[in-house]
């Protein structure tokens, strides 16, 4: 049996694309807004975070990246692991991102640092016309919206 060619843009091509492994944070405030960042030289907004170094635990990579990117110190145990998600990479054509995603609720101030050009707090259900990274658009904002609906249903 011979292998079938993979058509560019097909699901098979996406699954075969080289992977960038990252740790990302859904940084949320008590008012329900979540933080998105845009890196210098890019158009898409995404969650803060970054590449996991060899031998580094995902949560440690997350803590390091949040400190570097937005000046946020995350105490051990405050980041709640939500799972691993995959999507096409926003800023590296032909690659896909595999993200270990954590949720952090903060009311602390954050600021742009390192490679961050812009940051904004948005309502997950209404991000407006922002250019969003596929991981953010297809997985993470819908996850927050579903979680908020579930929490509202439990309260009623």
Image (tube, helix red, strand yellow):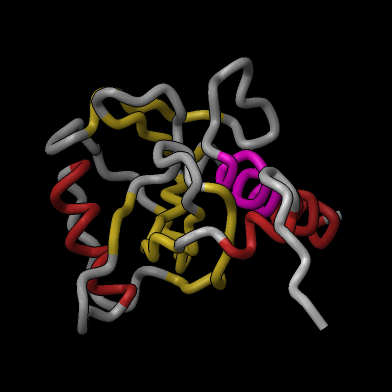
Residue 135 lies, in percent from the top left, at: 57, 48
Point 23% across, 64% down: residue? 63
Helix, strand or loop: magenta stretch? helix
| Residue 25 located within the stretch drawn in magenta | no
Could you tell me which residue is drawn at 24 percent across and 62 percent down?
74
Along the line of sight, the residue nearer the viewer: 67 or 78 = 67
Residue 87, position in %: x, y?
A: 59, 53
* Farthest-out residue, top: 129
Left or right: 64 in relation to 5:
left
Residue under the point 35% across and 46% down: 48
For residue 124, which quarter of the picture? Answer: top right
- Relative vertical location of residue 39 with respect to residue 15 in this rendering, above or below: above
132 vs 83: above or below: above
Q: Position of residue 34 (x, y in %)?
A: 49, 40
The answer to which image quadrant residue 46 occupies is: top left
The part of the chain drawn in magenta is: 134-144
């Amino acid at each position: 049996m011979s292998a079938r060619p993979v058509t560019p843009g097909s699901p098979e091509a996406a699954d075969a694309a080289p992977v960038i492994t990252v740790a990302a944070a859904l940084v949320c405030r008590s008012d329900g807004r979540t933080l998105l960042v845009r890196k210098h030289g890019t158009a898409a907004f995404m969650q803060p975070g970054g590449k996991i170094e060899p031998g580094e635990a995902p949560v440690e990579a997350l803590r390091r990246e949040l400190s570097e990117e937005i000046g946020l110190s995350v105490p051990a145990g405050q980041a709640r692991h939500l799972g691993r998600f995959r999507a096409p990479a926003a800023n590296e054509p032909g690659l896909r991102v595999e993200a270990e995603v954590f949720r952090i609720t903060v009311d602390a101030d954050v600021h742009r640092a390192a490679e961050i050009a812009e940051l904004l707090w948005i309502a997950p259900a209404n991000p407006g016309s922002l250019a969003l990274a596929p991981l953010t658009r297809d997985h993470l904002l819908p996850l927050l919206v579903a979680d908020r609906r579930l929490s509202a249903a439990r309260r009623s």
